[in-house]
Amino acid sequence: MKFCSRKAKLEGALFEGDHVVLGPSVIHEGTLIGDKVILGYPIRRKILLLLKEGRGVDFEALDAVSEGVRVGKQCIIRSNTIVYEQTRIGDNVETGHMVLIREGSCVGSGTRVGSFAVLDGKVLIGKNVSIQTGVYLPHLTRVEDNVFLGPHVRVTNDKYPPSSKLRGVVIEEGAVIGAGAVLMAGVRIGKRAVVAAGAVVTKDVAPEIVVAGVPARPIGTRDEYEEKKRVWETTP
Amino acid sequence: MKFCSRKAKLEGALFEGDHVVLGPSVIHEGTLIGDKVILGYPIRRKILLLLKEGRGVDFEALDAVSEGVRVGKQCIIRSNTIVYEQTRIGDNVETGHMVLIREGSCVGSGTRVGSFAVLDGKVLIGKNVSIQTGVYLPHLTRVEDNVFLGPHVRVTNDKYPPSSKLRGVVIEEGAVIGAGAVLMAGVRIGKRAVVAAGAVVTKDVAPEIVVAGVPARPIGTRDEYEEKKRVWETTP
Amino acid sequence: MKFCSRKAKLEGALFEGDHVVLGPSVIHEGTLIGDKVILGYPIRRKILLLLKEGRGVDFEALDAVSEGVRVGKQCIIRSNTIVYEQTRIGDNVETGHMVLIREGSCVGSGTRVGSFAVLDGKVLIGKNVSIQTGVYLPHLTRVEDNVFLGPHVRVTNDKYPPSSKLRGVVIEEGAVIGAGAVLMAGVRIGKRAVVAAGAVVTKDVAPEIVVAGVPARPIGTRDEYEEKKRVWETTP
């Protein structure tokens, strides 16, 4: 299905194939919208209301209620990605294929969101963040600039599930989270901290500290990590 | 591709965009079928047979061999979801985007199946179950009413892979499984038991017991869990 | 969107619905290409170049720069799968739905790649390999013949992320990796070794050895494993 809202401003956007753009979405110059991408999908409450009122739910109807999205310039939104309404994406952002970004999220300029990654609610992502394949970030997660999230990192927001009191994880500037690590609801990962692959983080991690294991415990500092990395990278 | 079987009964179903409905599928009133959803996809054996017999495998041919699905009333099946034939979905069920439900599965009324979740074979899900994003439930898994499965819970069915003797996990009524937990083949999670996020469950968990860790061990009771939760929720 | 390159050789390929075939792709006889499959998608560098040169990025433009893929005979490539250019797929290969295979990968004959699996770069897969649902294999991973990778196995390639020095994991012939196991960058899993479900492997595993736990440690031999399996399978 191809559908483009008459309210959308597409300026110099480039389209690969089919796509659905809903509501007063704004897409800036030089941005590529991949095949089968959906932008501006309405939040659940609005869908339920449309169904209740029997007003139809085709893209015309969804367009009428969508508040749209804002996508910056020179982005690449790859095929099958779905972005809900009320989302803001900066400049030079790239998504992989089959990414899901829910309502109210912000993605800073220069950030890359890997294939199959999910921003599952209002998620705030800084600039130049690297989100690898399959990362899961729930509602209320906040990720600062220059953070690296390895493949399949999973963040949670519910300490005693299922609860209505959710608490987002904060990942401070320059932190590195290894592949498959799990971060429990409400923890804060300090500036430039490192979480080893496979770790389960149940407590705050201080800035500059490296943690590993289940549950994660400190094993060193970021400076030591960078020194090991330097040796590793310069060894043939 | 848009394709709707002449054998399908769609009553008061509502369609968002394109969709494929195969076989004698029945979709009840007020149910929304999202863009690019495929309902009634044939099981592997039938596809192989069609290929072997050189009969073609376009949607006309698949329609001819599909037994269809049954979807209740007032459901929302979000975009890109694929439901295999012989599946029964109750009333007021919601799926997220890009969900895969394989043949023979049953999903009880009021249940929600999160985006990217996979019911990978004959999986029986009770009523009012909450299946969060990315949950994986293999063939023979049984989930009773009012269970909560956190994001990326992974269930297995093969004790000595790869084996032809599979044994499903049973999750009894009201149990809570935390994010990213892994449940080994054949374990039974008792009524109202709680499995902490990130746990790996290798043995049965008794009713009302809370387990955590790798491998998971008892750390308390459900009543204690509910009391901690109550304190947590009432603390500002 | 339906698009088929004039440069493609499709011989006796069979198509389910819509599909996109780019570049001089070759698809051999009796192979089923599912609905919404994309074959021959160009590598990132080429997309960036097209955008920079302002040459458009619709499927015509992508077709012009794609080197295509090679898919053998009697394969099944299920719906929504995306295969990048420069990829070679043998005969009798099956993919699930929503699989992503990146550029330069090779998939040997008789191999099955489960739904939502990702081959995320140049990944070499042998013959008759079983890759279950949601498996993640990054750039430089090498998997030999007859290996079994359980659901959601996650392999990494970056010892000190984020680094430009990546080191692939090697999984030797006949090895078995249990569900949800994590393999750290650069480890070698020996011939017929077994990694238990949920294990985190930080060191090489010798041939014929069974490891389990976090971090993974030896717990037995493959022969013992096969004996336990035999008893298990023959017990009613």
Image (tube, coloured by chain):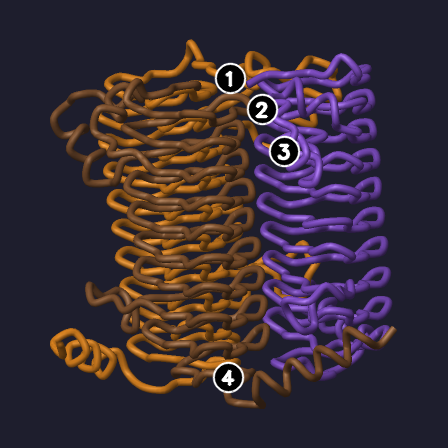
Chain colours: A purple, B brown, C orange
- Left or right: residue A20 compared with residue B119: right
**Viewer-nearest of labels 3 and 4?**
3
In front of the other: label 2 or label 4? 4
Residue C8 in view (yes/no): yes
Q: CA distance from mark 2 to mark 4?
A: 48 Å
Decide if residue A27 is in sight here: no
Residue A230 at x, y = what percent?
A: 74, 67
- Identify residue for label 1: C1
Disc 3: which residue = A52
Tell whether C90 sits left or right of B91.
left
Q: Amino acid at mark 3?
A: Lys
Do the numbered discs 1 and 2 sit on residues whose CB atoms are within 8 Å?
Answer: yes
Q: Residues within 10 Å of mark 1 (few under 14, many from 20)?
A: some
Give the Cα separation between the discs numbered 1 and 3: 32 Å
What secondary structure is marked by label 1? loop
Dot 2 corresponds to which residue?
Answer: A35
- Does A104 sit left or right of A197 as displayed? right
Location of residue A29 in the rendering, given as x and y in whole percent from the top left corner: 82, 20
Residues behind callouts 1 and 3 on a single chain = no
Residue occupying image coordinates x 49% and y 67%: C183
Separation of marks 1 and 4 at Cα, in angstroms: 52 Å
Q: The residue under label 2 is which amino acid type?
A: Asp
Name the amino acid type tagged 1.
Met
